[in-house]
Image (cartoon, rainbow, N blue to C red):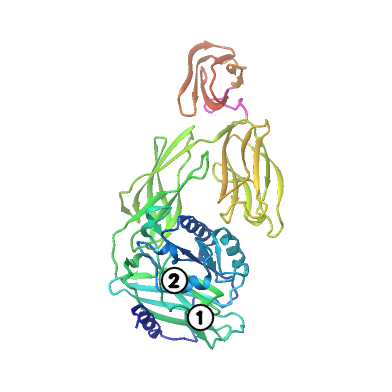
Amino acid sequence: MNVALFRSLLGLALSLGIVTALEAQSVSTEVQKKAVLLEEYTGVGCGNCPDGAAMAATIKQAGGDRFYIISIHEGHYAETEPDYRTEWGAALLEQAGDIGFPQGSLDRVQYEGSTMNANRGSWTKRAKALMQEEAEVNLHMEASVDAQSREMNIKVEYCYPETFADEFHLLNIALLQNHVIGRQNGAGDSYSHEHMLRDLITGQWGDTLSALQPGQVYVKEYTYAVPEKVGEIEVDIRNIELVAFVTRTTADVLNTTGAKPRIDNLDEPMALSASAVDLGAARYAGKNFPARIRNLCNDTLKRVEYAAEINGQVQNGQLDVVIPPYQELMVEFTVDDYEPLASNEVSVTVVSANGESLSLPELQYKFTGPMPISSDILYVEWETDDCPDEVAFTVKDRNGRAVYAQGPFEAGSGKQVLKDTVVLESDGIYSLEFSDSWLDGWLEGDKGSFKVKTADGKLLGQNYSVRGAGETIFVDLVKSTNSETDRMESELKILPVEGGLRILNPDLSIIRRVQVFDMRGALLFDKVMDVRDDVFVPFTVKTVQIGVVKVFTDKGISVTKAMLY
């Protein structure tokens, strides 16, 4: 008998059966929306497959625990070294249909009446639609594995909240492995393969569920020996996960759930890895710096302490998180107020986790500062795509407070065409956020777009193909050049004029010195004087920018931002 088949049958033989009453169950007995399963067919030799995996990961980020991925290495592109195929993949691909890699089956439902498999461009739309369906069966799973014996105990609870016509269904449990580092065409030799199928614990098409009663909670338990290897590939228990799903036959997935097994008898020191994530904006002035943190130990990561250096100034911070063992989470390192320059450099270093000191490399962020504007009135023309319930436009101040917001709109309301006038009440930095909650851009059907201008006609930004999570524009408003000074009560007013700046001095203070700096701190003008009158500051700059004007008088020092032409 085939060894793998024997192991699968042994796992079924060790099933503890069906229990028709639970004292305390975790599965719901109420009707719920279903979770969706993507079976992604891929291979090491497929150059476009990393893009498919990235798209699946984006849907997972948006869908959370209502979207699960099984990555199946099979077909021509998987006939490579290393060989990540399993004994189960060929039959799965044959049923789904091979239309060209990367491809994926969502809930094993026929796509456009031909095959179950569809290309990656349709995954998001289909996942959204399937998530609107009600689940015929509710599922909950939990598991634990002993690090020494590699014996895993699995419990699946299930309940049918309403009546159904089928005589039986099939329960499938898949063993997956994450963070398998290896070669991938189109991504190099150190690609991280995620959700890789390693075994089907319940066999090719699952374990039969029958004699079921609506509203009753059932449980099935399995004992399973996690293999040391599948083929020549080591199975690392620290990176395994389980996905369970119920099918009507060998197709038509009714619902899906997943679990990360608890690992017993494994004692490891605190460890993590951190990697910077692109800021996603051409200009930036935010206080949050995104990163991915992977927990590399068997304890839940709850607190991270870090040091951030911003343009040479050091700040310290703390981040409260919940990252289970060997899992990854997108986080944001937050900093206090800082003055963004024309060119900025930020480094973040994790110094401790759960109170234990660590030594990790710096995370580096480089960005251009916000766009300077003098108009406090913005004209915004924008259109949603055909999913207006996912699209929004929000203006936030430096502290993240929304000062203007439009959207999202009612689902099914169709494309929205809008013209907004935004009035910014005070000087300072603002973010204009054009967002998509499903992270798939304004690309559904008739694409969305936006254009932003100031009242004086300056174009701040436009995009006729908004992608991903959207786009953010940062601006720095100096509403007028006669702002009150920061350090003294004075009637001094700063006006940009041809060839420089004019300082109006209506209260006849004695002006003793004038300095002008750019936003990086470079000195542009410096002159000592003794004048009780208006002053002209002669200089020009190559491009329009915001500068800082310091005026020393007999009453103190005035520091004011001003437009430089």
Viewer-nearest residue: 195 or 3:
3
Q: Which residue is mark 2?
A: 89
How many labels, in total? 2
Q: 370 above or below 162?
A: above
Snapshot quadrant of residue 312: top left
Amino acid carrying label 1: it is Leu
Q: Position of residue 159 (x, y in %)?
A: 54, 80
Q: Residue at x 44, y 70 (%)?
A: 259
- What segment carries the magenta color? 480-491
> Whole-percent x and y of residue 261?
39, 70
* Residue 491 in sight from this viewpoint: no
Residue 482 belongs to the span the image colors magenta: yes
Between residues 291 and 183, which one lies in front from this camera angle? 183
> Along the horizontal axis of the image, is 455 left or right of 359?
right
Place residue 419 in its image quadrant: top right
Quadrant assignment for the N terminus: bottom left
Query: Residue most toward the bottom?
Result: 211
**Vertical order, 499 against 546 (above or below):** above
| Main secondary structure of the magenta stretch | loop
Rate crowding at label 2 as few (under 14), some (14 to 19) or many (20 or more) other CA atoms within 10 Å: many
Q: Which residue is mark 1?
A: 170
